[in-house]
Image: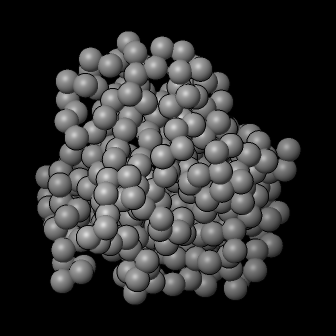
Amino acid sequence: MHKLANTHIQAYNPAMSHYQSNSPALWQSLLPQPDSNSHKYSRGYVMIQGGYPVTGAARLAALAAARSGAGITAIAVPAVALNIYASQLLSIMAKPYASTLDLYALIHDPRIGAFLIGPGAGASKETRETTLTMLQTAKPVVIDADALTAFSRKSDSLKKAIIGQCVLTPHDGEFEKLFGLRPAVQLPERIAQALVAAKQTNSNILLKGANTIIVGPDERVIVNENAPATLATAGAGDVLAGLITGLLAQGMPSFEAAAAAVWLHSEAAKLYGMGLIAEDLPGLIPKVWHQLTA
C-alpha cells in the first residue's frame, strides 16, 4: 500500500504552503438559496448513518445539516435504537433498519443528495463496508470520525472507491491512523501533508486544528483562521460534518462547501462565546447566515 511516507514531507515544495485565508468572498456566490419554486426535495436530502450505543453524535450532525438549509434530513438507525432516536427528533427523520440489506436499500434511495458517515458509527468492518456502499452511489459523501478510523492504513481502498465528490474530515489522530503519519505542527508542513493525502485519496481533506486546512486534489488550499478556542468541545466536529453534508446536498461544490461550513461553524461559536457546547451551534447557524447575507 502506498503510504504518506516521511520522504514526501521532507521534500515538499515550498510553493505548496501558499494558501488563501478562508473568507466568504471565496464561496459566498455558491451558497444555496431557496426560491419560490423550491420544495423540500429540491432543497436537498441528507442521509446520515446513525450509531448505537453512541447516538448523540449523529443527532448533532443531523441538526446542523438541517440548519444549513437542507430540505430533508434523515438518520438511518439500527432498529434496536429507533426509540432513542425517535423520542428526541422532530423534523429529523429516523429510518430504522434491521439488516444490512435494509440499510443498503435506504442508501440507494434516488432522492438522497449527500451522505454522512462516521459520527458515533463505530470503527468497525460494517462501518467501512457501509462507507464503500455510499461511495458507490457516486453522490457526495462526507467521511468523518469513526468512519475514518475504520479505514486505518487502508487509504488505498478509499481512493479506489471514490468516484464522486468526497470530503474527509480528520483531526490529527484520525489523520495518523488513516495515512500512517502524524501531522506536522508547522503550517507549511501540515499543508503539504494534507495535499499529499488529498491526491492519494482523490478527495478534499479538511484537516482540523486551531487553523483548519481545507485542500483539494487539484492543489487548492484554504486555511481557516477565524475559529475561537471555545470550539475545542465534544461534538463540535459532528456539527461541522453535518454542515458540510447539508451544503453538499443542496448542490454546493465539495471544496467550497467544506470551506463555507468551517467559516460558518467558527462564526457561530464566536457569537456564543464562553460556555459553548456543541448543542448550541446548530441554532446559531441561521444568525450567522443572516449576517452573511444582510
Taking the view exactly as shown, the residue that stands out farthest to the right is 1
Instruction: Residue 80: name its quadrant.
Output: top left
Residue 69: % across, % down:
30, 60
User: If the image is split into quadrants, where does the N terminus sit?
Assistant: top right
Instruction: Residue 39: name its quadrant.
Output: bottom left
Q: How many marks?
A: 0
Left or right: 45 as drawn, with respect to 69: right
The residue lying at 62 percent from left, 78 percent from top is 220
Residue 143: % across, % down:
55, 46
Residue 35: % across, % down:
29, 72
Q: Nearer the viewer, residue 143 or 194?
A: 143
* Res. 145 in view: no
Q: Is residue 33 above or below residue 41?
A: below
Left or right: 125 as drawn, with respect to 92: right
Q: Nearer the viewer, residue 125 or 19?
A: 125
Q: Nearer the viewer, residue 277 or 139?
A: 139
Q: Is residue 81 above or below residue 42?
A: above
The residue lying at 80 percent from left, 65 percent from top is 8
Q: Is residue 111 above or below residue 265?
A: above
Q: Nearer the viewer, residue 65 or 144?
A: 65
The residue lying at 26 percent from left, 70 percent from top is 36
Left or right: 76 as drawn, with respect to 149: left
Residue 292: % across, % down:
25, 79
Q: How is the image coloured?
A: one colour
User: If the image is split into quadrants, where does the C terminus sit?
Assistant: bottom left
